[in-house]
Amino acid sequence: MVLQRGVISETAVLSIIALAISGGANAFIADFEDLSLPPESYWNGSDGSGGFTSGKANFTNNYNVDYGSWDGFAYSNITDTATVGMEGQYNAIPGLGQGGSPNYAIGYVGWEEPPALTLNAPKVVDGLYVTNDNYAYYAVLNGYMSSKKFGGENGDDQDWFKLTVTGKDAGDTATGTLDFYLADYRSDDNSQDYIVNTWEYFDLTALGTVKKLEFSLSSSDVGDWGMNTPAYFAIDTVVPEPATVLLLGMGSVIIARTRKR
């Protein structure tokens, strides 16, 4: 391809745009498929590393050796969707990662810092996929120990279980918060009640440019010691702001200028 100095051809522009779009289609911030796991297993920080990195983000983890407990993020490829109670804490209820991929992350809100992911550079996060893990799902569906069955015995209790994501900029100042209901029984029409058991997209663009995302959970089921609903959730496939519209817009301007020449 030969170009005159100062002039770019329409073909060249379209080629650049096509390459950028095709390259960006798989440019996830994190999808956890770059993390190695034996089949039907999980990582929970017991190696004392204090977290893990997938793609372009670092995920927090706190592991207590004395108690064999953890909080923050773990990752898993367990496919079992039937196990109830704490034994199902590493199991995403869909049985696979988003889109049928093996790996996904499990978040647990414990007693240390909130689960968080920190980006390698500030950017707009378009969104991520969320769902329940087995432990929370079956506790909400049937009740478990101190956790109540949502809706109560007659289904009329207006219960809810909510994930909140807070954006933080490079100076650790909050840019906003967004909520996603992992279970919602607030409707007067009981047929509208639901517990999430599939991967659902959570749009985060309203948080703007962020360096960090922090995750918290809340529930209508609260006792003397705090939330009774198991404080777990699952995430997968964190994606950046799509650049397609911007690229096409830039291409149109360049093409228009080229044609004028």
Image (cartoon, rainbow, N blue to C red):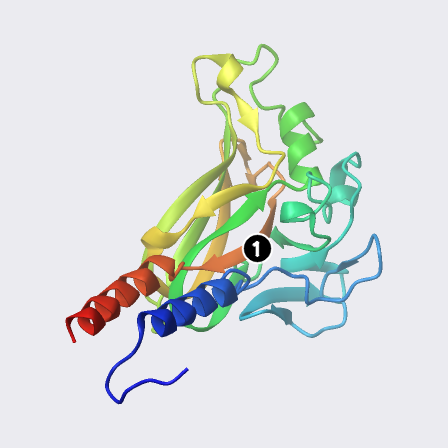
Q: Nearer the viewer, residue 44 or 219?
A: 44
The reply, left or right, for residue 220 in relation to residue 109 is left
Q: In which quarter of the image is residue 147?
A: top right
Q: Which residue is drawn at 65% across and 26% down?
A: 141
Residue ranking furthest to the top? 154
Q: Which of 95 and 61 is in front in this view?
A: 95
For disc 1, the marked residue is 237
Q: Residue at x 58, y 10 (%)?
A: 154
Q: Quadrant of residue 253?
A: bottom left
Q: Which of 198 and 254 is in front in this view?
A: 254
Q: Where residue 213 appears, x then y in whole percent? A: 45, 60
- Does the image show residue 23? yes
Q: Residue at x 38, y 62 (%)?
A: 243
Q: Where residue 74 appears, x then y in whole percent? A: 67, 59
- Does the image show residue 174? no
Q: Residue at x 62, y 29 (%)?
A: 140
Q: In which quarter of the image is the N terminus?
A: bottom left
Residue ranking furthest to the right? 39
In this rendering, the answer to whether 157 lies above or below 229 is above
The reply, left or right, for residue 52 in relation to residue 169 is right
Q: Is mark 1 on a helix, strand or loop?
A: strand
Q: Where residue 254 appears, x then y in whole percent? A: 24, 71
Residue ranking furthest to the left? 260
In this rendering, the answer to whether 52 lies above or below 139 is below
Q: Where residue 4 appears, x then y in whole percent? A: 28, 87
Q: Quadrant of the C terminus?
A: bottom left
Neighbour class for label 1 at 10 Å: few (<14), some, many (≥20)? many
The reply, left or right, for residue 185 in relation to residue 65 is left
In this rendering, the answer to whether 87 lies above or below 47 is above
Q: Which amino acid does label 1 sit on?
A: Thr
